[in-house]
Image: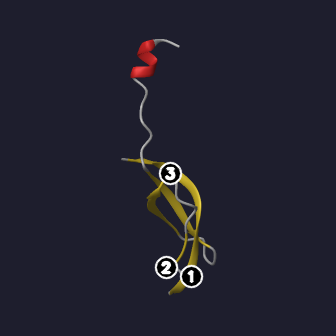
Amino acid sequence: MFLTNVLLKKAKSKSIMVQMESLVSGHTFNKVRERLAEKLELIRFDPYIQKESVYKEKKKVKSVK
């Protein structure tokens, strides 16, 4: 490995943006969480069914600084 490759490596960000999806209706939104934290699961108002529902983390969208 070249010395320049070691010096110019990008540091990983501490946060990532993930897509959250409703288990009831499929409504999605994006939320930022720490990279090392466990996958998110939360209760939030779902506009499709006009009630609160459980949202689970579906996939990673991008890294955030």
Residue extending farthest to the top is 2
**Badge 1: residue crowd in 10 Å (few <14, some 14–19, many ≥20):** some
Horizontal relation, residue 7 to residue 25: left or right:
left
Residue at 58% x, 62% y is 39
Q: Position of residue 36 (x, y in %)?
A: 52, 53
> Badge 3 is on which residue?
61
> Badge 1 is on which residue?
53
Above or below residue 9? Residue 39 is: below
Above or below residue 35? Residue 12 is: above
Residue at 49% x, 79% y is 44
Q: Secondary structure at mark 2?
A: strand
Whether the residues at callouts 1 and 2 have beta carbons within 8 Å, the answer is yes
Horizontal relation, residue 2 to residue 22: left or right:
left
The numbered disc on residue 44 is 2
Horizontal relation, residue 49 to residue 14: left or right:
right
Residue 49 visible in this rendered orientation of the protein? no
Mark 2 or mark 3, which is nearer the start of the sequence? 2
Q: Secondary structure at mark 3?
A: strand
Mark count: 3
Identity, as a three-letter code, of the amino acid under mark 2: Arg
**Badge 3: residue crowd in 10 Å (few <14, some 14–19, many ≥20):** few
Q: Position of residue 60 (x, y in %)?
A: 54, 52
What distance separates the C-alpha of mark 1 from that of mark 3? 22 Å
| Res 22 → quadrant | bottom right
| Res 21 → quadrant | bottom right
